[in-house]
Image (tube, rainbow, N blue to C red):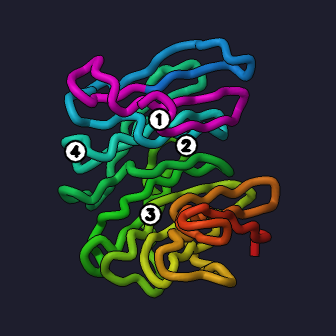
Amino acid sequence: SFGRSVAVGSGRIVVGAYQDDDNGTNSGSAYIFDLDDNQLTKITASDGAASDSFGRSVAVGSGRIVVGAYVNDDNGSAYIFDLDGNQLTKITASDGAAWDYFGWSVAVGSGRIVVGAYYDSDNGYASGSAYIFDLDGNQLSKITASDAAASDNFGQSVAVGSGRIVVGTRGGLGGSAYIFDLDGNQLTKITASDGASGDGFGNSVAVGSGRIVVGAQGDDDNGSNSGSAYIFDLD
C-alpha cells in the first residue's frame, strides 16, 4: 500500500504505506524523500503495533511531518516528526473514544496541525469532528460543523494553508466542505454548484496559494464516477 497517501512541502516528499508490517501486520510506515526522489529515511511509530495503520494519512509543511494512525489502541493517534524523521511527539484527542478514527486525515500548514476524526459522534453517529494543534502538538481546539448531523463524516478530509482550515464531509446531498480560520471559527460552508447525491464532494480537500480545491470522485460528467474537482477562492 505504498502510495496510499502522499504529501509534499518544506522540501520533502512523504509517502505512506499503512499496511507495512515492520511492527506487526498492518502496523504501517512512511518514507521520506528529498525533492529529487532520493529516499532519506523510513519512519514508523515509536510504539507501533499490529493493525495501527500508521501512514493511512500523511502531511508535511511548516517544518513538520505528520502521520496518522487511525486505528491505534489510543482511540486513534497522529505522530509529529521533524523533517529528518525524528519523532517529536504523539498526539491524541482530548476526548477520544473507540472507533472515532482520529488520524484518518491529517494536515499541517500555516503553523497548525489538523487531524480529522470522521467517526466521532458528538452530533450523532459518525457526525465527525476535527482537532487543531500547534506545531508542538498542543491541542488548541476541536471543531465540528455548524449544521452537523449523523453520518456526515465531517473530517473525512482536512487541509490547512493560506490562513484557512478546510474540512470535507461525505454526508448531505452530494457532500460539502467547511472553511474555518486558524482558531477554529467557521467562516462558511461550501457545496458544489451542480451537486448531486453520490458525488462525494468533500472526499478530498486541499488549500494553498490562495485557492481551495475540493474533489468529487463520484461526479458523473464524463461517465459514471468519472469524477471532478472544484476550485474556490479563500472566501
User: Nearer the N terminus, badge 2 or badge 4?
Assistant: 4
* Residue type, label 4: Asp
CB atoms of marks 1 and 3 within 8 Å: no
Query: Which residue in the structure is indicated by mark 1?
Result: 80
Query: Which residue in the structure is indicated by mark 4?
Result: 74
In the rendered structure, the answer to whether residue 202 lies left or right of residue 232 reads left
Q: Nearer the viewer, mark 3 or mark 2?
A: 3
Q: Which mark is residue 135?
A: 2
Label 3 secondary element = loop
On the image, the x and y values in percent for residue 45 come to: 34, 27
User: Nearer the N terminus, badge 1 or badge 3?
Assistant: 1
* Residue type, label 3: Gly
Outermost residue toward the bottom in this view: 147
* Residue type, label 1: Ile
In the rendered structure, the answer to whether residue 209 lies left or right of residue 89 reads right
Quarter of the figure with residue 40: top right
Label 2 secondary element = loop
Label 1, label 3: how many angstroms apart (C-alpha)? 19 Å
Label 1 secondary element = strand
CB atoms of marks 1 and 4 within 8 Å: no
Q: Nearer the viewer, mark 4 or mark 3?
A: 3
Magenta range is 1-29
Label 1, label 4: how many angstroms apart (C-alpha)? 16 Å
Q: Which mark is residue 155?
A: 3
Which is more toward the observer, 12 or 169?
169
CB atoms of marks 1 and 2 within 8 Å: yes
On the image, the x and y values in percent for residue 193 come to: 69, 83
CB atoms of marks 4 and 3 within 8 Å: no
Residue at the location (30% across, 64% down)? 119
Label 2, label 4: how many angstroms apart (C-alpha)? 20 Å
Disc 1: CA contacts within 10 A as few (<14), some (14-19) or many (>=20): many
